[in-house]
Amino acid sequence: MADGTQGLSDKALSIFAFAAYHRLLSGERVSSVIRRDGAGHEADPDGVAELEHRGLASASETSIDLTEAAQDFTETLVEAMRRAAGA
């Protein structure tokens, strides 16, 4: 997992931040996030392309499907946030 996520750009990390947000709210593992919601919110196209290029996601016009490795990375981010918050 570390190899595929090593050195991710902030644009790609922003997609993981969104996935982590949903993970924290739902308490459930996140396998996809909205790419474009039709209300003006949209994942950064360069970030999406980077995740696709690295084999961490596949995207349609409206959603981003995370691979198992990307889902694991999201879990790692959430755990790190909890540790940083002393939870």
Image (cartoon, rainbow, N blue to C red):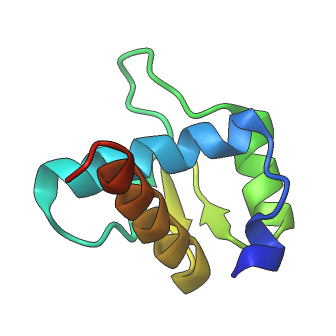
Q: Which residue does the image show at 68% across and 71% down from the upper left?
A: 56
- Image coords of residue 12 (percent x, y): 70, 44
Looking at the rendered image, the quarter that the N terminus falls into is bottom right
61 is higher (above) or lower (below) than 40: below
- Image coords of residue 73 (percent x, y): 54, 69
Q: Which residue does the image show at 47% across and 42% down from the upper left?
A: 17
26 is higher (above) or lower (below) than 10: below
Closer-to-camera residue (4/47): 4
Within the image, what quadrant is residue 23 found in?
Answer: bottom left
Asked if residue 32 lies left or right of residue 60, the reply is left
- Image coords of residue 84 (percent x, y): 38, 46
Q: How many marks?
A: 0
- Image coords of residue 70 (percent x, y): 57, 71
Task: Name the outermost residue toward the top.
Answer: 40
Task: Name the outermost residue toward the left.
Answer: 26
Closer-to-camera residue (32/20): 20
Q: Which residue does the image show at 53% across and 84% down from the upper left?
A: 68
Asked if residue 59 lies left or right of residue 31, the reply is right
